[in-house]
Amino acid sequence: MIPIIDAHHHIWRQADLPWLQGPMVARIFGPYEPIRRDYPIAEYLADIKSSHVVGSVYVQTNWAKDRALEEAAWVQSVADTEGWPHAIVGYADLLDDGAPQTLRALARIPRVRGIRMQLHWHENPLYRFAAAPDVMNGALFRKNFAHVAGNNLSFDLQVFTSQMKDAANLAAAFPGVTFVLQHAGMLEDKSTEGRASWQEGMKRLADQPNIVNKLSGLGTFIQRNDPSHIGDVIHEAARIFGSDRCLFGSNFPIEKLWTTYAELVSAHRAALSIYDPKEQLALLHGNARRVYKLDVTARR
């Protein structure tokens, strides 16, 4: 069986996350009571046990902004003890004057490979994260983004269709940075017009050779594990980006709200079964290993 590198998952301690404390705040993925608790690496390893996952990438989980370094250091300590995860995508506030110092400090943490600052904005307030749709165009953001490149970090890019033109321009302005598009461009409008707009935006992003596409979080807007939907998104994304620029991510434990890890992987493997073994290996393993510069020696 082709081994998997999970390029997008989380672990957390509830006490560290403001959004998991107090009254439940509406989130893009719907009600989340079952995951308002610790999700430690031991549980993640139990979840992946039967799925032939050989490596993983942790992606930041929105600790308080002033604790970005503490978050990455904690995940590094978990990796030092458990051997997992194999890479870390941390957080830096690129609208903060102290971002250059944060980025330099993050780059010194051994398993940090990149950062994510969520830029997605939507007319629907429930889908909105950033304060404005065009944050990435601001002078301070661009000034600080130069330090992402200067510290040899990647950038996990999270935007909606309406922001893809600006995102493509950002990638063009920083050709030395690898941009990892989150959740296959977050297709939330599956109408004929919505899908056409998403395809157009994805093509615009794919025109930038430094953008790769992460096949993760595909259940976010339908809140279920739907093999047909997963297959549709994977095939269209692979057609646009090519099989050498797409990589798998589970988005666990978020997807655990409606499925198991084994069922999620099964749906992805079924969708990928039409590709030849070399392409499947790239999509499930090789591309993530290259993009996140992984030295994956662990085997399950």
Image (tube, rainbow, N blue to C red):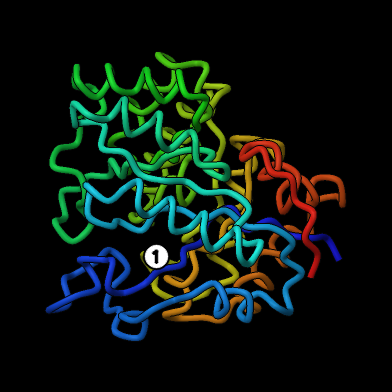
Q: Secondary structure at mark 1?
A: loop
Instruction: From the viewer's perspective, tell me whether residue 69 is left or right of residue 134.
Output: right
Residue 230 sits in which quadrant?
A: bottom right
Question: Which residue: 52% across, 75% down?
Answer: 225
What residue sits right under mark 1 in the picture?
220
Q: Name above or below for residue 295 compared with residue 211.
A: below
Count numbered badges in the picture. 1
Q: Position of residue 15 (x, y in %)?
A: 27, 73
On-image quarter of the N terminus: bottom right
Instruction: From the viewer's perspective, tell me whether residue 23 is left or right of residue 250.
Output: left
Q: Position of residue 82 (x, y in %)?
A: 63, 67
Question: Which residue: 22% across, 44% down?
Answer: 121
Q: Name above or below for residue 24 compared with residue 275.
A: below
Amino acid at dot 1:
Thr
Question: Which residue: 57% across, 78% down?
Answer: 42
Q: Position of residue 232 (x, y in %)?
A: 57, 57
On-image quarter of the C terminus: bottom right
Query: 113 or 246, which lies in front?
Result: 113
Query: 144 or 102, which lies in front?
Result: 102
Query: 183 or 287, which lies in front?
Result: 287
Q: Position of residue 196 (x, y in %)?
A: 41, 42
Question: Which residue: 55% across, 80% down?
Answer: 43
Q: Name above or below for residue 160 compared with residue 280.
A: above
Instruction: From the viewer's perspective, tell me whether residue 290 is left or right of residue 280.
Output: left
Q: Name above or below for residue 264 compared with residue 151.
A: below
Instruction: From the viewer's perspective, tell me whether residue 153 is left or right of residue 234.
Output: left
Q: Label 1: few (<14), some or many (≥20) within 10 Å?
A: many
